[in-house]
Structures are given as structure tokens and as C-alpha cells.
Amino acid sequence: MDKNLGDAPFSLKNRMGRMLWGTVCFLLFRPSPRPFHSWRSFLLRLFGATMGSNCHIYPGAIIWAPWNLDCADSAAIADGVIIYNQAKITLGRDAIVSQGSHLCTGTHDYESPQFPLLAFPITIGSRAWVCADCFVGPGVVIGDGAVIGARSVVLKDMPGWTVSAGHPCVPIKPRKQIPAV
């Protein structure tokens, strides 16, 4: 590590990229009108995000590192969602993350005296819906077509085409598979 910069777990390039993204986000992303989804997708792509067609990323979404975001066609991230993506976060086709939810790829090794940052990717499957105010933790995979009930805390993988909810989140019942349009 660069001794002049302390023991930061991220490279200077990463920190500079986040600083530049923060400026662009403040000046161009957040104040953009709600219907300007293509504009926000363009800005995210400029910073390394993979964005499918017709993605709906709202201006009140907080995205920590666009280069660690991968959205398939028609994925949606609502206002107030926190995408804390030290590792990759992937949203499948037609996946929805509703308002106030928090997707967090990072944790710490609390058994080490150095308390190092650990980061594990999160995957939200195609046609899955993470309802309002959910927390999705590091390394979680939410299967295709899954519904995660409001205010759930998801710390383990959730099966596809299942309605799950709770603290901790557990599968409750199957979800009828709806044909794709």
C-alpha cells in the first residue's frame, strides 16, 4: 500500500474513479428528470457499467461503483436504492429492485485483527423482484422469478420462482411461472 495514502483497501485508481463518478452523479445523474433513463444508462456506461436496453435506473438510486454494475435488458433500480458494489452486482433481464433496498457486496473479516474488507458478488435473477426496503448481503444469489418480500433481510441464496420473506429471509411459497412477453 502507498504509505502516504494510508491502508485503504482500494487502489488510488478506484478511489479517483469514485471521486469522478461522485461529481458526475451530483451534477448530471441525480438532477436528471425521472423519465431520462437512457441518459442515466449512458452515464453509467461511461463509467464502465454494462447496461442492457430499456433499463430504468432512477435518479435517486445511489450507485457506489458503476464499473461493478451489470444490468440486463429492462432491469430497474428505484429511487432510494443503495447499490454498494465493491464487488459485481448483476441484475437479470426484467429484474426489479424497489425503493429503499440496499444491495451490499462488502463485509469484514471480524476474526482478523486487521478487520480486512471482504467483497462477494450479488446476483439478482431475471424477472426477480426485490421489494421495498430489503437488505441483500454479500455473495447472495436470488433466483430467476423470485419475489423477496418487503423489508426482508437476505443473507443466503433464495430459490427461483419462489416468494420469500422475513428476517432472516426464508422461502414461503412457490410463485407461478409467468411466460415471458
Image (tube, helix red, strand yellow):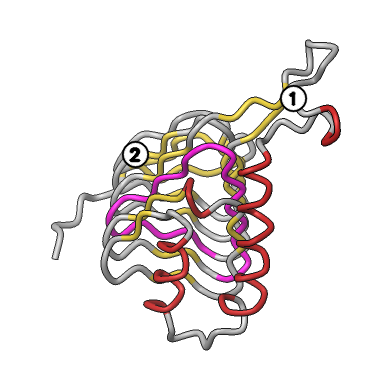
Disc nearest the viewer among 1 and 2: 1
Left/right placement of residue 76 relative to residue 135 reads left
Q: Does the stretch in magenta take in 92?
A: yes
Would you place residue 142 above or below residue 145 in this image?
A: above
- Give the image location of residue 90, x and y in percent: 40, 45
- Left or right placement of residue 124 versus residue 5 in this view: left
121 vs 145, left or right, is right
Secondary structure, mark 1, is: loop
Residue 120 versus residue 52 in the image, above or below = above
Image point (61%, 71%), residue name: 24
Residue 11 horizontal/vertical position (percent): 66, 36
Check residue 21 for magenta coloring: no
Q: Quadrant for residue 119, please give it.
A: top right
First reached walking from the N terminus: tag 1 or tag 2: 1
Marking on residue 1: 1
Instruction: Tell me the magenta residue range.
Output: 79-98
Judging by the rendered image, the residue that carries numbered circle 2 is 143
Q: Main secondary structure of the magenta part?
A: loop
Quadrant of the snapshot with the N terminus: top right
- Look at label 2 and name its amino acid: Gly
The local crowd at label 1, few if under 14, some if 14 to 19, many if 20 or more residues have their Cα within 10 Å, is: few
Disc 2 secondary structure class: loop
Horizontal side of residue 117 vs 174, given as left or right = right
Q: Position of residue 88 (x, y in %)?
A: 47, 40
Q: Of residues 21 and 100, which is closer to you in this image? A: 21
| Spatial CA span between label 1 and label 2 | 38 Å
Residue at (85%, 31%) from the top-left corner?
6
